[in-house]
Amino acid sequence: MVFLPVMASAQFVTFWTEDFGSGCNSGQYADTYFGPMTGAWTITDTGPLADTPNNWFVSAEENGNAVGACGTGCGSNRTLHLSADQTIVGTDLGAAYFEGLDGFCAFFGCGGTDRRVESPVINCSGIANIILDFKYIEGGNAIDNCTLWYFDGTTWSEIADMPKTPVCPNGQGEWTAFSIALPFSSNNNTNVKIGFRWINNDDGDASDPSFAVDDIELNGDFATDAVPPVVTCPGSETVFTEDFCAILEDYILQTVVVDDVDPFPQVTQTPEVGSNLTPGTYDIVIEATDVAGNSSSCTFQVTVIDDDAPVMTCTPTVNATAPTGQPEVFVNVLSPDVEENCGGYTLTNDFNNTDNASDNYPIGTTVVTFTATDESGNTSSCTTNVVVTEGAVDCCLADYNCDGFIGVVDLLFLLQDFGCSGTGCLADLDGNDVVGVSDLQIFNGVYGTFCP
């Protein structure tokens, strides 16, 4: 099993050891052992057990001999080992296990076992390139076997099936050194454990020794970090404008940053949090830099969409008067007030198709529609009524048809109105509210006159 190195120019140190102590003792279950420098070990049943399964012990019943030496019984160097736990054959026989025999369990008991012994929590903070070293003996067969397990703080996984150790002429196992690199997830991990899982069946084919281990060490690099953080960005997203253009939010909290040594890398976001974004698509870069200066980044996209039309307010009505005799007049029409939440806009009207509706307007009412279109194509409209009235007629006295000459046509109009009474009489030249002889006399005085 090979793991790529993750540190450079580092100091290799031993940061965790367990030798299980010294002195001659027997029968101490592993889950009652507490390492003075490490802590308490535990035992977990990982599969089915027979009625008299084997168990894990910490004692000198299996002495921790030097690498290359053969296994021996009780000495003064304690080891962790898998042994029988049974009334007939005995309890804690060193690295010797009981298997029983199918069909005879009622007489002798059966020793089918599936148990893992687990270390205390190991704090690997500030350490990388971690190597696990220990010495061990292992017998058994292909079915009766011990494997090495690793806990990353969340999940247990098997990382090695150690080979059976050589058998000495005296039938005991030969103490053998073993070394393996722990997975990358152990780097700077404060919640690591290691474990040894023993499994044997009840086929009666036991082959001593079982398994024993001693002098466990964890070594690693503790110096210059050469590996950048691993940065995982959130997914790309679409945001919509509100009263203003989009304000870029803080995506750092949604980003996962993991570094092998530095637990708190510096993380930055570009563009900066709070930036005002107009409609469009933007690359958002999250960069993490660890304490050693190693950096890495990830990129995702934020698309800003403006779906809000401009807000418009038009002048409701504009009044104007055309000079007498003219069909139209120039009218100054105020442009509407326009509020746009994001970017610019264009303004047009349907009277002269420009942004300025001031122009010549005919007599009568003209409805002018203004339209504002923002940069994202959102539109809104409002209207202004331009009301143009004709100027009052101002003709000479007795020039009833306003042709600039007082003649027969005007006389006929007077005769037609002769006898009219009230304020509505147009031929009432003397203003007495009656069209009569006095009005005819005034008309005779101006007959034939040209109006200036």
Image (spheres, rainbow, N blue to C red):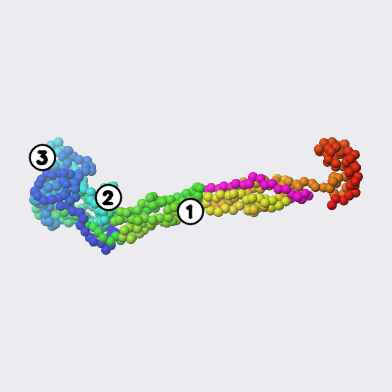
Residue 325 in percent (x, y) is at 78, 49
Q: Nearer the viewer, residue 302 or 131?
A: 302
Quadrant of the snapshot with the N terminus: bottom left
Residue that sits furthest to the bottom in the current view: 9
In this image, 297 relative to 344: left or right? left
As shown in the figure, which amino acid type bears the numbered disc 3? Answer: Ile
| Snapshot quadrant of residue 287 | bottom left
Spatial CA distance of label 3 from label 2 is 40 Å
Viewer-proximal residue, 405 or 351? 405
Which numbered disc covers residue 277? 1
> Which residue sits at x=71%, y=52%?
330
SS class, disc 1: strand
> Residue drawn 83% across and 40% down?
431
Left or right, residue 134 beside residue 349:
left
**Measured from the top left, where is residue 272 in percent x and y?**
43, 55
Residue identifier under label 3: 88
SS type, badge 3: loop
Q: Nearer the viewer, mark 3 or mark 2?
A: 2
**N-term mark: 3 or 1:** 3
Frontmost residue, 252 versus 193: 252
Q: Does residue 123 appear anywhere in the picture?
A: yes
| Category of crowding for the residue at label 3, using alpha-carbon neighbours closer than 10 angstroms: few (below 14), some (14–19), many (at least 20) | few
Measure the alpha-carbon separation of dots 1 and 2: 42 Å
Q: Is residue 120 above or below residue 433?
A: below
Label 2 belongs to which residue?
Answer: 152
Which amino acid does the dot numbered 2 rest on?
Asp
Task: Tell which circle, 3 or 2, labels the residue nearer the N-terminal end.
Answer: 3
Q: Nearer the viewer, residue 362 or 308?
A: 362
Q: Residue 322: horizontal and vertical position, in percent?
A: 74, 49
